[in-house]
Amino acid sequence: MVLISGEAGIGKSRLIAALLESLTPEPHTRLRYFCSPQHTDSAFYPIIGQMERAAGLLHDDTPQQKLDKLDALLAQTSTSIQDTALIAEMLSLPNDGRYPALELTPQQRRQKTLEALTAQVETLSRQNPVLMIFEDVHWIEPTSLVTIGRLLDRILTLRVLLLVTFRPEFDAPWVGRPYVSSLFINRLAEHEAGAMVDRIVGNRLLSANIRQDIIERSDGIPLFVEEMTKAVLEAGGETAAERAIAAVPSPALAVPASLHASLMARLDRLGGPPKEVAQVAAAIGREFSHALLNAVMRKRDVELGSALDRLIAAGLLFRQGLPPYATYLFKHALVRDAAYGTLLREQRRALHARIAETLEVQFADIAESRPELLARHWTEAGLIEKAASLWGKAGQRSLAQSALVEAAEQLTRALDQIATLPGTPVVRREQIKLQVALVNALMHVKGYAAPEPKAAVERARQFIERAEALGEAPEDPLLLFSVLYGAWAASFVAFNGDLTRELASQFLALAEKQGQTVPLMIGHRLMGNSLTLTGDIAKGRAHYNQAFALYDPATHQALATRFGQDVRVSIFVYRALAQWMLGYPEAALADVDHVLEDARDSGHAVPLMYAQFHTSLTNVLCAKYAAANAQSSEVVRLADEKGAALWKALGTMQKGCVLALSGEPSEAIQMITSGITMYQSTGSRVYLPIFLSHLSRAHAECGQFDHAWRCISESMTAVETTKERWYEAEINRIAGEIALKLPQLGSSQAETYFERALTVARVQQAKSWELRAAMSMARLWHDQGRREKARDLLAPVYGCFTEGFDTRDLKEAKALLHALAS
């Protein structure tokens, strides 16, 4: 992979063009992708464009013809019928029966589409070396960014060169990998700019003072050098050239303004039709089809063709294919911007309205499959009601497809525009619906306890209260519960034990008052989570059982996008923790097995990240470290794909905990510390006592006892502050084990900590924590010669267990009892 960065107009595209020209005689497959500032929230946009060009899909083609062309293209790579069906769906082509119906959830479909695209590149690379070029990646949308990441993971074993161009403001996530090279393009020196001017001028005359003015005003940007020189040459004559130069702003102003003035002068000189065509094309976007331009322009073919030919001859446009099936590309995004800038405000509005109407009437397939494209044109046209509706449709569509970042952006745009409309019952209902959807998207993108989702929850609550005050109860009875869930989730992740229990009680009380199954089920789940983590473990498990009894997979699985996670998955992951703590390891592991199966079946990324992380907690408790490591690694991978900061932090910390328990304390310290930094930046605190205690353990293993005591003290303080008490017994036991390593503290202090761990575990009826604390105390007493007392402590606790005798804790307890009896 080669990363090529540089400011606008510096020559990134020209460098790519030179490479392509030099490679012409070499056998290779070329895949070229263009990102667009008008499509930063259209999933797969550059990939769809490349695939449509490669297949030769035309607007006038019938759906059957488009499918035939796609089949012919994919036949070259022996693509399976299932993958062909996925790619056809990505291209919004209807299945006419030639492909199998794929019964997939949105996330499964997204995942398998990514796999199909990667498989395409792998197959092509076996036939010929592949050159992949992603241009202007500073405008890439999240889904295509994920696709590049997946390709990069495979590229080391393939005959593929991947080139990526972008402006400096883009933070490339691949920098630093061993097989990634970076190239930054600097501005031209004065003598280099002069040489470029001379090359463009050739044998024509150009006075020295005008030449020097071009060099100074272009400021070392190659595109500006080229365009200003052409503007001067096109002006004709010394006086006209001087006027052209004088029209360019002072070099003290921003350089793009200089280019803008030069390009405007060139467009003016080209005359009426070419300038008008450039303006309309610029409103469509940097890349556009002949069919759409022709439909919007409503000009005679000869007149339109002549205008386009003149723009191409002037070097402002590139053309691929032949009219009426051609596609066009502005030479540079700045050229498009300059053409667009020549339009007055009312001209722009009218033009965007014309484009939107044309798309709706004559390009209905595009309008339906890309509502965000239509929304952008209606927005620019100033028709806010239409635009808001389409942004909302796009956001809901992205949310259903697990495109979380795109969903948050589109829903925010919809809500911003709805806020400017007159308040009517219809508008208020739409506002509530979209605000609740935004809460869901933001919780996973930013983190439950981050300021953005908390503010979104509060706004949703205000919208609902205002509607109710006006006698406009929401049509959807679950909307209020969705908002209450958002408030509870923020409190839970930031963990305020008292508030979390209070909000869960309010939720359950309202659910019981209304008597609806879904709110009751969710309410019992929230009560289960709140009670379990605050130390009322047996009561928590009872609520999980009540929630599970109400769950119906056929009707309730879809609630994952309304209440954070699949309810059944959430019940199982937390009930597994409760089962283990109460002394039922086998039951806990059985719940874990159900969880992973259900999470994968859900097809959504969020429930899968949620399930993988929480089941890794149970696997760590059962000393299944390999499984826990694989699960936390999968959480990090999925979180990177989805831009989910909270889940990436949790997965990173959990991987560190596994390292601490597997005898790699140095690596554990680094990973847990970096994870905690990420985690706290999202406003989250739940589970911090666990991670801090493992960090303390790792520091102690490295002999860093000052850091160990600092971390264990922070963990204990967090328990007291937040009242997250379910791990309290284990924290005290770990403190006791660390104390034994220090002569200045020794056995007396360790015994105090072990006793405290036993007391907490007994109050919570947490037999597994009690067993661990009893083993630690028994080992201490054994070393002090108090074997009988140690046996009398440990034997009754071990005797309470009825299952799980193959797990590590129970095996160690049995071995210790045997040693105490000998």
Image: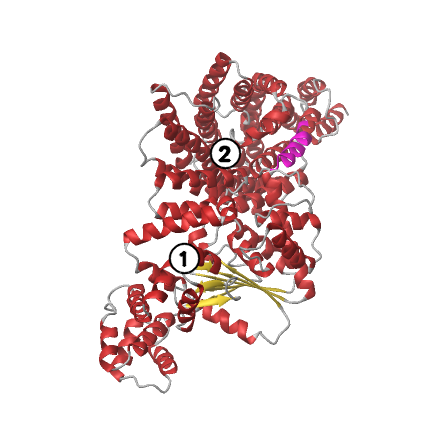
| Name of the residue lying farthest toward the top | 513
In front here: 707 or 330? 330
Q: Residue at x 52, y 20 (%)?
A: 519
Can residue 699 be seen? no
Position of the C terminus by quadrant: top right
Instruction: Say whether disc 2 or disc 1 marks the residue closer to the N-terminus.
Output: 1
Q: Amino acid at mark 1?
A: Arg
Mark nearer the viewer, 2 or 1:
1
Q: Amino acid at mark 2?
A: Leu
Residue 83 position (above or below residue 691): below
Q: Which mark is residue 705?
A: none
Labelled disc at residue 298: 1
Q: Magenta stretch: give its range.
A: 591-603
> From the viewer's perspective, is 549 left or right of 261?
right
**Up-down relation of residue 142 to residue 782 (above or below):** below
* Residue wearing tag 2: 688
